[in-house]
Image (cartoon, grey):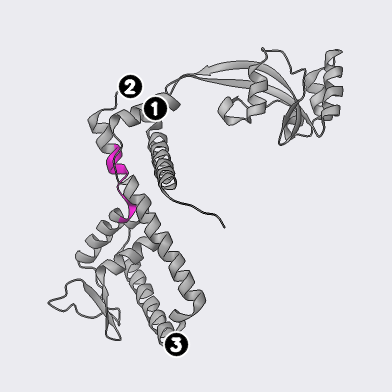
Amino acid sequence: MSVSKHRLSTLNRARRPLARQVKATITALVLGGLALAPIAAFAAEPANSPDVIASINGKALMKDGFLVFVSSRVPGDQAAHLNQHQLQELLHEYINRELIYQDAVAKGLNKAPQVTMAIANQSHNIVASFGVREILSKSPDEATLKEIYQRLYDKPTTEYKTRHIMVNDEATAKQLIDRLDHGEDFAKLARASSLDTSAKNGGELDWFSSQQMTKEFSDAVSGIKAGEYTHTPVQTRYGWHIVQLLKTRQIPAPSFEQVQGEIIAQWQKEAITNYINSLRKQAKIELK
């Protein structure tokens, strides 16, 4: 399936960094003439410093710093809906933080060992996050998106309708299989013996694909026909199972448009994984 240039452009725009969207939104609100004057600490902007929004004990607070603060406090999808009152509240909070910060520095708290370690750790987190952002700022090409779609989504999915009996040990499972072999009803046996919550429904489960169930369970189901049950107990992390396949159905492959968000997320996941793997291959790592 071909991904049009228009669609690719739309996907790329959707991936614009969140901080840039927030900054653009808040900048528009600030430059749009919001009434910030009622805030006592707000100072008139010097003619030669248009980006200064306030002065606290002689220290200038810059607009860009405020925008970064806002982006850390307001989810990107809410930034476009900030009103004058909300922006003033954020500026109050920003000024209060600066006052507390200045007082803490005056007391020497910024030099305390636990503080310097916390700052160093947070600094690493921030720089590393921008390293990841830089990787994700590169737009995926059409061929890459198409490859992901064809590899993961461009195929019909088989779903299974089953019932099962779950017990704690293999010996009990074998005893139940023997009873089934002698003609006992699967659903009745599940109601009486299964430890799973599905017991009240005769062990019947919702439709599922192989990707949605544990590998052991899925492998067991794929190896039997409709109406059959497993004659060997199936072990999963939940317990021991006897599984009966009731029926199967084919789900058509979704269109690219239906899964485009998942495709972008998969591309991001793979891009980050490849980036980290390349760094690890180039690095000299010694565990001590």
State whether residue 80 appears in this view: no
- The type of residue carrying mark 1 is Tyr
> How many C-alpha atoms fall within 10 Å of the one at disc 3: few (<14), some, or many (≥20)?
few
- Could you tell whether 134 is left or right of 281 in the image? left
The nearer-to-camera label among 2 and 3 is: 3
Mark 2, residue position: 1
In the foreground, 143 or 92: 143
Image coordinates for residue 71, horizontal then vertical, percent: 35, 61
> Magenta stretch: dominant SS?
helix
Q: Which range of residues does the magenta coloring cover? A: 11-19
Indicate the quadrant where residue 189 lies.
top right
Give the answer, above or below, for where 31 lies relative to 184.
Answer: below
Q: Residue at (40%, 24%) from the top-left corner?
A: 150
* SS class, disc 1: helix
The kind of secondary structure element at disc 2 is: loop
Q: Which mark is residue 107?
A: 3
Q: Which numbered dot is residue 149?
A: 1
SS of the residue under disc 3: loop
Name the image quarter holding residue 170: top right
Residue 14 magenta-drawn? yes
Query: What mark, if any, has residue 73 been given in the picture?
Result: none
